[in-house]
Amino acid sequence: MNTTAPKLHVDDLRVAFRTGEGLVEAVRGISFDLGQEKLAIVGESGSGKSTVGRSLLRLHPRSAQVTARAMQFGSTDLLTCSEKTMQGIRGRRISMIMQDPKYSLNPVMRVGDQIAEAFLSHHRVSRKEAEERTLAMLEAVRIREPRRVFRLYPHEVSGGMGQRIMIAMMLITEPEIVIADEPTSALDVSVRLQVLATLDDLVGQRGLGLIFISHDLNLVRSFCDRVLVMYAGRVVESIAAADLEHAQHPYTRGLLAALPSVDERRERLPVLQRDPAWLAA
């Protein structure tokens, strides 16, 4: 659990998108602090999880309306700082691991060159030094034969290796915060555990703050320190991951009840019954 001063302070974050029928609120007044910890944001599709992550890096289109009482990263106000300042933060101090590497990696560049390019964009070093850093980073994310993998194209690597390559690309700049948006959802169980172990080791060794966006309550219960549960753009519950079984909000309890279990056989999983009062709570 976090015992240090927060790396990130978010207070009353709101995000709305303009549509043909007017403004649609995707995130409605969420607040949290992030320290040296693994913070999960969970909820159904459309609850606003990824929207929060993208807001922190100002990755939404100009038509989006993003407001907050505070969105403070160290001494930097992420809402009002210049685009030049944000360019120095994106990838360098705050990195984001996307959900599927095949959509995030450039298909016509060797994976090693892509990782080295991420390092060179933020550090004035020689190409040789960037390549050596890349090889060391590939080794750190448990890729065997890093020199061989360096020369491969994205279509020549498996899904699990591609995800580790994405992690290497996001961590080679030594960021202070990593936002991982469903980084294991497309992987099988054994590869998922390897990727999580890699992330866990790197977070511990480098003292990072990790925002882990996921649908998987069982996964975050065992992997993360703290959980924010989102429903319809709001945080309805904040709870220690180890205490998730004792969640109080009926939405969280409904999500937990809908999980299948190998220990308890049920003919039919319960369907979550939503209460309109949750939208205004």
Image (cartoon, rainbow, N blue to C red):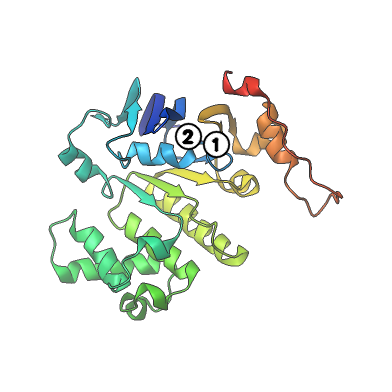
Whether residue 88 sits left or right of residue 272 in the image: it is left
What's the residue type where badge 1 is placed? Answer: Arg
Q: CA separation, marks 1 and 2?
A: 9 Å
Residue 61 in the image: x percent, y percent? 30, 40
The disc placed on residue 2 is 2
Residue at the location (44% across, 44% down)?
A: 210
Residue at the location (27% across, 29% down)?
A: 79
SS of the residue under disc 1 = strand
The disc placed on residue 151 is none
What number of labels is visible?
Answer: 2
Q: Quadrant of residue 72?
A: top left
SS of the residue under disc 2 = loop
Whether residue 85 sits left or right of residue 8 in the image: it is left
- Answer yes or no: is residue 120 visible: yes
Residue lying at the far bottom of the rendered structure: 148
The vertical placement of 15 against 97, above or below, is above
Q: Quadrant of residue 161?
A: bottom left
Q: Nearer the viewer, mark 1 or mark 2?
A: 1
Nearer the observer, 116 or 15: 15
Nearer the observer, 226 or 2: 226
Residue lying at the far front of the rendered structure: 20
What's the residue type where badge 2 is placed? Answer: Asn
The vertical placement of 100 against 242, above or below, is below
Pointers 1 and 2 in contact (C-beta within 8 Å): yes
**Label 1 belongs to which residue?**
226
The vertical placement of 272 against 116, above or below, is above
Residue 38 in the image: x percent, y percent? 49, 42
